[in-house]
């Protein structure tokens, strides 16, 4: 117990996405779309989307804040300010927001005139279903669509324009995109439900708010006036403007499902089971100092804000803040807490935007660790039948782990690239996590296949501060975890939730006792 | 003729004002979801800039100009008592009026030429744009043809408007005005009348409170501290969304 007497403990529903497990199937996106954004004005919105990295993403180059001016930046003096919005800027740019993405930065939603296939008059040509715009209803040429850059690593228009490549040397970039060495991974994204949300801060109408109970960030549709500053302010471009209703919308973390104890649709439907959801307890008093720390410190301070739910002091403080015992229980068995704090495996996306995002990613090891070497396979080729197909190249995609962590440093993805995504450019933070993942892999290889010497594994575990037990725990939650291990959803306390809708005192007064207004006042 | 005049300058203003007040409150409270700026920047951003900026800046200056002359007629007349100052005022007002016209026309052209903007155009949008166009053209016409408006507005129209506010309409001066000016006055009340039925609602909800509110906003549905306090079984705290 340290001497921190005053804490403002709050609970946050938080997420971990394990990128090694993502197969890029977009099932999450479809589950979300079917439930929430299959409406006029929202066709183009993907509250959940899956991007190929390296790639430009959706909307194009969303990470490039020189274009979109999202997130927070340090002020010259103390503190931080919104880069492209905020009180003076939002009000002076209210007639025309100069940094706002337009629909062409996402894509123009389209459908096809399917009826033409059936109803076209007989003729010489086969009828076709022409694409038509879902905005104007007129025929259009499709220039872009959802996940247009899917799997296009190495492509000049997408992968090479990835803003995260900016700090890489031309040689490093070329090495990344060499034919036969090219790699990519998927980055599923939803709203980060940040602790220092830029969208909330930018809303002139005060329509956006963070729910106190679980930290979900929501837009009140009756208060939103379409001033569209949130679209600019969110550095992740996860608030969307509905062009039909004139209101902004965003991921609601399926709160109606959460309140009923169900996992959000994207997480429930996840084929690769990459998604974890649970409670984190954090100290709200430290938001400001974490968000306004030096860029090198933001990540560490954000991690420090997350509190140990087993610490008696934290528990006492949480209770005095009105956090339910069941929520504290959920925080103690939260898979997110394990990945983020206990095992130190997960990192937030772009912590340098200073919004303190509460969605964490376990960085992908697979595309990183494999190395490619040239081998002399002439001897092998000579043995083969002359009519056999001979591959002229002599590349070997090598995922062996002879040298413990050598492959991480000589990775196909420069560590700097991964660091630009997940740790504000700090390669040691991302390197540590990849090494840990590698150590777990070595440990399991020894357990199941047994072709790695015990000494090597011991060394790997010791280097990364793991024990066999911890490595098995990580393995369990990564590979074997069941539904209830992956989603630890605290009770919404429906017995109290009903009081969110109506004051039970009113009802009591109405059902037989004949007095109502005075009830609440008695005894006070 | 007098019946028509009485209708236009006594009855109609009160009808318009009533519809405005009742309509705005009703729509704000009952149909809050429909109150939006209905920005179309998301569908088309470049042409919008050249329309919306001159239109809004122009109309704000012109509106507050009219408001000043209405509320402070003596000060306005005093200011105008020196010809140079009168001319500066008139030229400024005219320039901003012309800015409104330029902005409005380019917004209308954008609405006509862009298929995407046509897709989000309602009949009420067209109605209010035509009404505003007529009002601006009339205003510029008056500024050119019936000098000097800054002074005679303060001398003749300000007392008329004030008499409407104090519920004792004095209409002699208005009845005697040329029809161009009469149309402009009727147009002004017509715009007021239209506010609850159109996107003009958005100026009612101009987000000036943003200046004073803290950046972050956290809302608890229910104050759990109060729930847990055994001393308050009959809590007086109400849920925020109730």
Image: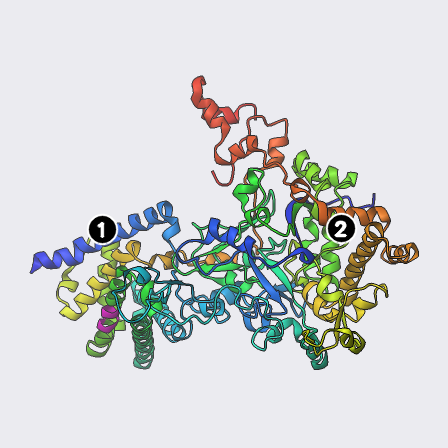
Specify whether residue A132 is painted magenta.
no
When the figure is inspected, residue A498 is found, relative to residue A349, above or below; the finding is above
Q: Which one is in front, A175 or B187?
A: A175
Please tell me which residue is depicted at 75% across the width and 53% down the height of the picture: A304
Please tell me which residue is depicted at 48% across the width and 71% down the height of the picture: A98
x, y percent for residue A257: 54, 42
C-alpha separation, residue under disc 1 versus residue under disc 2: 70 Å
Please tell me which residue is depicted at 70% across the width and 73% down the height of the picture: A181
Please tell me which residue is depicted at 34% across the width and 56% down the height of the picture: B201
x, y percent for residue A268: 58, 46
Residue located farthest toward the left when viewing the structure as drawn: B1
Identify the main secondary structure in magenta: helix
Dot 1 falls on a residue whose secondary structure is loop
Which residue corresponds to mark 2? A341
Which residue corresponds to mark 1? B167
Dot 2 falls on a residue whose secondary structure is helix
Report the side of B149 relative to A221 (left or right).
left
Q: Picture quarter containing residue A262?
A: top right
Confirm whether residue B166 shows in the render.
Answer: yes
Q: Which one is in front, A454 or A263?
A: A454
Question: Disc 1, disc 2: CB below 8 Å?
Answer: no
Report the side of A163 relative to A449 (left or right).
left
x, y percent for residue A346: 72, 55
Report the side of A398 relative to A204 (left or right).
right
Q: Magenta segment range?
A: B133-138
């Amino acid at each position: 117990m340290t001497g921190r007497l005053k804490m403002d403990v709050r609970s946050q529903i938080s997420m971990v996405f394990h990128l090694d497990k993502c197969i890029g199937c977009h099932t999450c996106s479809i589950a979300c779309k079917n439930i929430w954004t299959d409406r006029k004005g929202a066709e183009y919105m993907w509250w959940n989307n899956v991007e190929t990295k390296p790639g430009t993403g959706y909307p194009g180059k969303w990470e490039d804040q020189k274009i979109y001016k999202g997130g927070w930046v340090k002020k010259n003096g103390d503190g931080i300010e919104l880069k492209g919005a905020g009180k003076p800027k939002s009000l002076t740019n209210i007639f025309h927001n100069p940094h706002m993405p337009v629909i062409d930065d996402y894509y123009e939603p389209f459908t096809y005139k399917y009826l033409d296939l059936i109803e076209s008059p007989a003729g010489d040509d086969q009828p076709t279903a022409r694409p038509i715009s879902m905005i104007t209803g007129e025929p259009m040429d499709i220039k872009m669509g959802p996940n247009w850059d899917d799997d296009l690593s190495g492509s000049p228009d997408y992968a090479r324009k990835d803003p995260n490549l900016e700090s890489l040397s031309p040689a490093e970039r070329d090495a990344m995109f060499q034919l036969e060495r090219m790699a990519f991974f998927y980055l599923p994204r939803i709203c980060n439900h940040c602790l220092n949300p830029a969208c909330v801060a930018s809303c002139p109408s005060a329509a956006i708010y963070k729910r106190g109970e679980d930290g979900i960030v929501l837009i009140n549709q009756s208060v939103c006036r379409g001033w569209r500053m949130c679209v600019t302010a969110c550095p992740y471009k996860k608030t969307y403007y509905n062009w039909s209703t004139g209101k902004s919308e965003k991921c609601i973390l399926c709160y109606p499902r959460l309140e009923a104890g169900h996992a959000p649709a994207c997480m429930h439907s996840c084929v690769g089971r990459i998604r974890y959801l649970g409670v984190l307890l954090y100290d709200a008093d430290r938001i400001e100092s974490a968000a306004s720390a030096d860029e090198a410190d933001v990540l560490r301070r954000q991690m420090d804000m997350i509190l140990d739910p087993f610490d008696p002091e934290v528990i006492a403080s949480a209770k005095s803040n009105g956090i339910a015992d069941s929520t504290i229980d959920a925080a103690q068995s939260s898979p997110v807490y394990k990945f983020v704090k206990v095992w130190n495996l997960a990192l937030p996306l772009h912590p340098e935007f200073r919004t303190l995002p509460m969605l964490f990613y376990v960085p992908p090891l697979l595309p990183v660790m494999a190395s490619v070497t040239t081998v002399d396979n002439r001897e092998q080729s000579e043995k083969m039948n002359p009519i056999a197909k001979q591959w002229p190249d002599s590349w070997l995609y090598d995922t062996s782990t002879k040298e413990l962590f050598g492959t991480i440093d000589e990775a196909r993805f420069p560590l700097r690239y991964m660091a630009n995504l997940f740790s504000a450019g700090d390669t040691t933070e991302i390197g540590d996590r990849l090494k840990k993942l590698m150590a777990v892999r070595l440990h399991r290889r020894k357990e199941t296949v047994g072709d790695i010497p015990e000494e090597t594994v011991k060394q790997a575990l010791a280097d990364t501060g793991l024990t066999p037990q911890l490595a098995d725990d990580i393995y369990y939650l990564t590979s074997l975890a069941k539904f209830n291990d992956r989603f630890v959803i605290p009770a919404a306390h429906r017995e109290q939730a009903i009081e969110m809708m109506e004051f039970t005192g009113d009802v009591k007064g109405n059902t037989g006792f004949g007095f109502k207004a005075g009830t609440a006042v008695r005894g006070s | 003729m007098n019946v028509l005049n009485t209708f236009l300058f006594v009855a109609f203003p009160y009808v318009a004002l009533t519809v405005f007040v009742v309509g705005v409150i009703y729509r704000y409270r009952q149909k809050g979801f429909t109150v939006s700026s209905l920005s179309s920047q998301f569908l088309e951003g470049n042409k919008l800039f050249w329309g919306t900026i001159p239109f809004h800046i122009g109309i704000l200056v012109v509106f507050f100009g009219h408001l000043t002359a209405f509320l402070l007629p003596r000060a306005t007349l005093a200011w105008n008592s020196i010809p140079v100052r009168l001319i500066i005022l008139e030229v400024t007002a005219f320039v901003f009026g012309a800015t409104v016209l330029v902005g409005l026309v380019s917004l209308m052209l954008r609405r006509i030429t862009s298929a995407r903007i046509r897709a989000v155009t309602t009949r009420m949008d067209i109605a209010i744009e035509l009404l505003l166009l007529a009002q601006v053209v009339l205003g510029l016409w008056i500024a050119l043809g019936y000098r000097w408006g800054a002074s005679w507005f303060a001398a003749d129209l300000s007392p008329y408007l004030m008499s409407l506010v104090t519920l004792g309409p004095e209409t002699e001066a208005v009845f005697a005005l040329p029809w161009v000016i009469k149309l402009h006055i009727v147009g002004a009340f017509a715009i007021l009348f239209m506010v609850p039925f159109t996107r003009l609602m958005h100026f009612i909800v101009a987000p000036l409170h943003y200046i004073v509110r803290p950046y972050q906003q956290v809302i608890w549905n229910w104050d759990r501290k109060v729930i847990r306090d055994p001393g308050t079984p009959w809590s007086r705290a109400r849920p925020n969304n109730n």
